[in-house]
Image: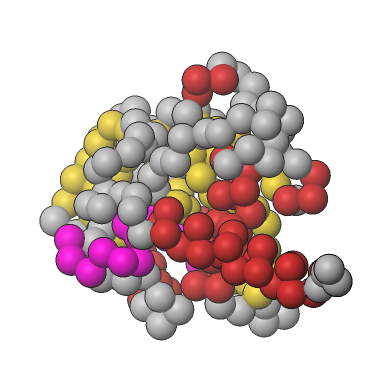
């Protein structure tokens, strides 16, 4: 029999893509079914809250582009391969929530994206290393304070920046007269807790690191 390597490659890619879609469609139905990083709420207002996160390890994919949605999808695809065994231990890791996409606008018109997934610490201080071809890195957070605004529906290209602006506006009102210069670079993070197949009860958050901005007891200074 004559084999068709092109057809085989296309079929294999289809199977992998279909498996990822099916998996994503069955995780995180309401945002509370898997393990998430723990935090303490230090300050709360109707529009937002300020949380203290302790040291956390994330698996991180770096991307450049112009689309939040596409970058999140492409970055998570690489991370998903890592947790399915493309790592130094060939071990499968648990899916966690949320999936983070940190957004860093740049003057040249492109945007830097960092897609991250929380690593459960059952490997101690050393999670398995990702396979080199995935181009992933482990991002270790120090303790930090994060301002968080929740929003429903879908996180999309046309609404994530508006949610971030709403959070910054709320912070500026409450901390009027404080040092808000740390918010001028417009860096923010979108946290998504739900699969795309879940149309109701969705939970998204926009995060802004405020450790260097707010003076709240318990917030570490950078």
Does residue 121 lie above or below 162 as drawn? above
Quadrant containing the N terminus in the rendered view = bottom right
Count the numbered circles shown.
0
In front: 91, or 157? Answer: 91
Q: Name which residue lies at 25% across and 43% down.
A: 32
Percent of width and height locating residue 2: 85, 71
Q: Name which residue lies at 73% across and 51% down.
A: 134
In front: 168, or 78? Answer: 78
| Main secondary structure along the magenta-highlighted residues | loop
Percent of width and height locating residue 166: 30, 70
Q: Name which residue lies at 79% across and 50% down.
A: 133
Q: Is residue 66 left or right of residue 34?
A: right
Percent of width and height locating residue 123: 56, 20
Quadrant containing the C terminus in the rendered view = top right
Q: Is residue 127 left or right of residue 206?
A: right
Question: Is residue 157 covered in magenta?
Answer: no
């Amino acid at each position: 029999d004559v084999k068709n390597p092109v057809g085989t490659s296309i079929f294999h890619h289809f199977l992998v893509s279909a498996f990822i879609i099916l998996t994503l469609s069955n995780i995180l139905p309401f945002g509370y079914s898997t393990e998430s990083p723990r935090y303490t709420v230090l300050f709360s207002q109707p529009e937002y809250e300020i949380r203290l996160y302790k040291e956390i390890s994330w698996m991180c994919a770096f991307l450049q582009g112009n689309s939040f949605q596409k970058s999140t999808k492409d970055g998570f695809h690489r991370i998903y391969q890592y947790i399915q065994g493309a790592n130094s231990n060939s071990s499968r890791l648990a899916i966690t929530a949320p999936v983070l996409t940190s957004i860093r606008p740049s003057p040249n018109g492109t945007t830097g994206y960092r897609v991250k997934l929380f690593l459960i610490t059952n490997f101690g201080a050393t999670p398995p290393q990702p396979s080199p071809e995935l181009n992933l890195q482990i991002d270790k957070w120090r303790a930090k304070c994060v301002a968080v605004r929740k929003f429903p529906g879908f996180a999309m290209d046309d609404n994530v920046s508006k949610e971030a602006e709403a959070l910054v506006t709320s912070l500026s009102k409450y901390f009027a007269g404080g040092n808000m210069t740390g918010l001028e670079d417009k860096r923010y993070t979108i946290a998504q807790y739900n699969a795309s197949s879940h149309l109701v009860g969705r939970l998204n958050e926009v995060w802004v690191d405020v450790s260097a901005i707010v003076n709240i007891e318990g917030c570490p200074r950078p």
